[in-house]
Amino acid sequence: MSPTASYDEIAEWYEHAFLAQTRGLSEHPLGIDVALRTLLGTESGPCLEIGCGTGEWAGLVRELGWTPFGVDLSAGMLRYASGRLPVARADATRLPFASSTFPAVITVMAHTDMPQYPGVLGEAARVLHPGGVFVHVGVHPCFCGGFVDRSDPNAVVIRPGYLDSNWTTDSWTDQGVRDKVGAKHWPLPNLLHAFIDAGLMPDRLFEGGTPVPTVLAVRARKN
Ligand SMILES: C[S@@+](CC[C@H](N)C(=O)[O-])C[C@H]1O[C@@H](n2cnc3c(N)ncnc32)[C@H](O)[C@@H]1O
């Protein structure tokens, strides 16, 4: 099944069951909100979210002073997002925007959905203003993925598999997204090199989730 078809199928569950678990908490347990507050910061101007899903982060982006805009491949996810921010249905590898359109671009928990993530970073760089900010928030390449068993938060088990980048639906839980739609794992050097190769220079990092981080966030600037 293609990733788009998968998200179309789970959109209702994602919006009403998966996201509902963390909505209304004072802080997101994986630190996604803190990552965005810390790395994106408060400024004004249009901010593009690539892979915006149901638009969960539009409110926070707006609260920080930005004007959110979203793109996603899944019409099912966008049905919810369109009530929260202006959206376009588009493939992240071919963004329907002119070069240097946005002062800020973000992706949140989406890079493992994108086997062409290096190309997506290239597109993010293209549509960013020179000096613009790119914020990536994603699952932590070292402590999260099909090779990790997080069923006991106090004893996270890393199994062989970190070096395997194949698409997988392996997951320690059947209550999450990855057992349903699958994921592509990016070892840490591959991920960071993809930023650098796209001309997005990392200048700040953030880890979220305890007691072992679940999220790695990166802020980078376009050269
Ligand atoms: C795990 S969801 C994250 C959604 C949202 N950012 C959030 O944090 O709730 C990943 C999203 O990436 C989208 N996606 C996957 N591949 C894509 C592509 N090539 N172009 C645009 N969106 C894509 C999926 O449709 C899905 O909505």
Image: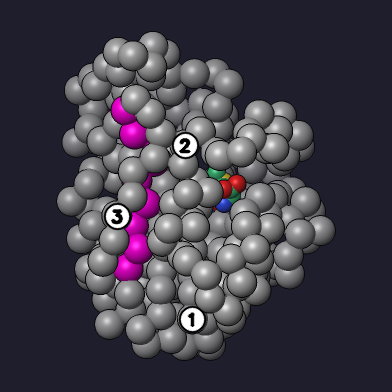
Please provide percent x and percent y for residue 37: 49, 57
Measure the C-alpha gap from mark 1 to mark 3: 19 Å
Provide the residue span drawn in magenta.
Answer: 212-220
Please provide percent x and percent y for residue 125: 38, 76
Earlier sequence position, callout 1 versus callout 3: 1
Specify the label residue 30 is tagged with.
2
Tell me the residue at 29%/45% (across/down).
Answer: 186
Measure the C-alpha gap from mark 3 to mark 2: 15 Å
Tell me the residue at 33%/14% (across/down).
Answer: 154
Whether residue 215 appears in magenta in the rendering, the answer is yes
| Chief SS of the magenta region | strand
Residue type highlighted by circle 1: Pro
**Residue 222 quadrant:** bottom left
Earlier sequence position, callout 3 versus callout 2: 2
- The residue closer to the viewer here, 27 or 207, is 27
Residue type highlighted by circle 3: Leu
Name the secondary structure under disc 1.
strand
